[in-house]
Amino acid sequence: MGNPVLIPADLPGRLADALRTGRFAVTAEIGPPRGADVGAIRESAALLRDWVDAANVTDNQGAQVRVSSFAGSVVALAEGLEPIMQMTCRDRNRIALQSDLLSAGALGIPNLVLMTGDRPERGDHKDATPVFDLGSETLMAAARELRDEARLLSGREISPPPRFLLGAVDTGAGVPDRLQQKIDGGAEFVQTQFVFDVEQFARWMEQVRDRGLTERCGILAGVGPIRSLRALEFMAAIPGVVIPEAFERRLRGVPADRVAAEGMAACAETVAALREVPGVAGVHVMAVGYEQGVPAILQTAGLGPVRTP
């Protein structure tokens, strides 16, 4: 069992239900395609829908143009996979962002993750004009006011208000002051950066528990399989990601054709270990482009399907 979280009873969705009841939650991630064909989203949904409570649909991740998170979320919903629609502040002003919030509610998208977003110079349109009319905290405030007060940032009232679960992201390391600010601002679940050092993460979670935050917000620890040495080097360069020496030695100590299998096994072991960390509400499995590996990771970690077909 995970850690029961105080989630309003009228919020819909399997993820909200898992957090309310303390059932160990599992989320995954889908990267929308770069072309005008959503077949890949349908395929990913078919692979994931029986194994996860919900899946993030990313919002032009890496500041690269893709099918929108909103469109991808609608497709996932139609395929029986509960979506978590990501929203970044990079590309839209407060009018467009609030319009998307209303649209998500109108079409039954039950979960949102609100983020600042990567800057355009990191992506494929380096000369694009960044918007950042709102930041992640003010976007969260706008979403809470829209949902709970039925009011736009302008003060204008709307009816009916949308109903969705609100999420944020966090590094999962250091002093949890920023995490507390996000929870105070309205985050009901938080997905962390990749966790490879479970002992370090457990120490961070002790601080989170001491502040009483696990009763107010579901902490979903980020995990994912490293399937090549090149991916290991890439991961080690990501700010906030800590690769323990023992973990690196483990992957470098097997033949090249065994690295992927060893990375999968290590990921499953991490999931199993995180289930034993007090206060952890679930895991967020990031295996974009390798969704077919998610069921094997979960099954090896002792987690079965979340539903039967």
Image (cartoon, helix red, strand yellow):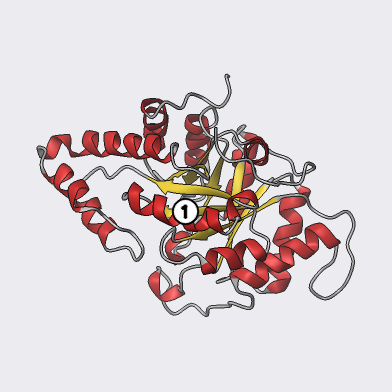
Residue positioned 58% across, 77% down in the render: 132
Q: Where 110 falls versus 122 (above or below)?
A: above
Can residue 107 be seen here? The reply is yes
**Image position, residue 300 (x, y; %):** 36, 26
Q: Quadrant of residue 295?
A: top left
Q: Quadrant of the N terminus?
A: top right
Q: Nearer the viewer, residue 117 or 204?
A: 204
Label 1 secondary element: helix
Is the residue 304 above or below the residue 97 in the image? above
Snapshot quadrant of residue 147: bottom right
Instruction: Please give the name of the residue rendered at 53% of the width and 68% of the height, measured from the top-left corner.
Output: 178
Q: Residue furthest front?
A: 210
Q: Position of residue 78 (x, y in %)?
A: 65, 36
**Rendered residue at 41%/34% (across/down):** 294
Seen as rendered, the residue at the extreme top is 309
Q: Amino acid at mark 1?
A: Glu
Q: From where the camera sits, is residue 34 visible? A: no
- Vertical relation: 176 (above or below) 269: below
Residue 304 percent coordinates (x, y): 48, 24
| Image location (x, y in percent) of residue 240 | 36, 63
Q: Nearer the viewer, residue 246 or 305?
A: 246
Side (left or right) of 210 relative to 172: right
Q: Is residue 117 above or below residue 42?
A: below
Quarter in which the C terminus is drawn: top right
- Residue placed under numbered mark 1 in the picture: 206
Q: Is residue 206 left or right of residue 214?
A: left
Neighbours of disc 1 within 10 Å: few (<14), some (14-19), many (20+): some
**Image side of residue 302 versus residue 17, left or right:** left
Q: How many marks?
A: 1
**Closer to the camera, 46 or 299?**
299
